[in-house]
Amino acid sequence: MAVQIVCVIPARLGSSRLPHKPLQRLAGEPLVRHVARRALDLDDVDRVVVAADDQRILDAVADLSVDTELTEQGHRCGTERVAEVATRAKYSRYDTVLSIQSDEPFFPMEAAHGALERVRLGDPIGTAAAPLSASDLTDVNRVKVVVNGEGRALRFARVTPASGAWGCDVQVMHHIGMYAFRRDVLMHWMRWDPPEGEISEGLEQLRALHHDVMIGVATVADAAPVAVDTEHDLQLAEAYLESQGERVGR
């Protein structure tokens, strides 16, 4: 029987760096619409869901071929929101849950495919990473991941970790905001309390590493397109679309 995959895009209205981030306009449209449309183009995903804590976010994608789910407001991170959706009866048949952050309007398709492939190959969780550019080395808004020779994550951080502290056969890369979860692992994950590092750094992936759950990392060859975490990122995203001749208004 073929593995069933649901993609969930968690979104919340509140954001310390960019208020009302999912509804911020990019090329005339709410940011969350760009992410949802791109997710619909993933050929190995069976269903796409936008999960949010505010009806205004769901209204912004209501005319797209996605499910919309209103979720609790008290979640501490996106994965908790994704897990809430996964527990609902109509999503119980999906073996793998792909979470794509709602601030990744240009996420690489190969990154999503790669994260899913890591789970197909046996990793409990899959994610993706790209080469780390010089400008991202000191940018705390760009999450870094230390990847070992087997393609598994050793550490996530906002400040660039010293690669030498982890041995010779490691790379420090730019983390891309997506995760593929085996369903049973996601159900365990939602019951764990966040460790101190997750809270202080705002990095939900540290919860899995704290509980010794392996995260496989698919790598992409090109630098990751901009994710929107700040007002400056939004300007960079507009410039990127203009450079690509892709100003959309659908």
Image (cartoon, rainbow, N blue to C red):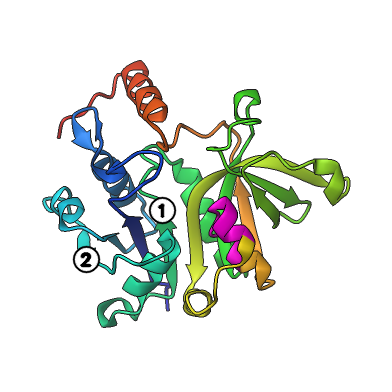
Q: Is residue 135 above or below residue 208?
A: above
Q: CA distance from mark 1 to mark 2?
A: 17 Å
> Foreground: 224 or 156?
156
Quadrant of the rendering where the C terminus is positioned: top left
Secondary structure found at label 1: strand
- Residue position marked by numbered label 1 in the rendering: 100
- Residue position marked by numbered label 2 in the rendering: 70
Q: Is residue 207 above or below residue 107?
A: below
> Foreground: 246 or 76?
76
- Going by the numbered disc 1, the residue's amino acid type is Ile
- Label 2 environment density (alpha carbons within 10 Å; few <14, some 14–19, many ≥20): some
Point out the tag, 1 or 2, that comes first from the N-terminus: 2
Secondary structure found at label 2: strand
In screen coordinates, is 73 left or right of 135?
A: left
In screen coordinates, is 28 left or right of 122?
A: left
Q: Which residues are magenta?
A: 197-207
Quadrant of the rendering where the N terminus is positioned: bottom left
Residue 13 horizontal/vertical position (percent):
27, 51
Residue 109 horizontal/vertical position (percent):
44, 44
Q: Is residue 231 visible?
A: yes
Residue at position x 34%, y 58% in the image = 10
Label the magenta part by its dominant secondary structure: helix
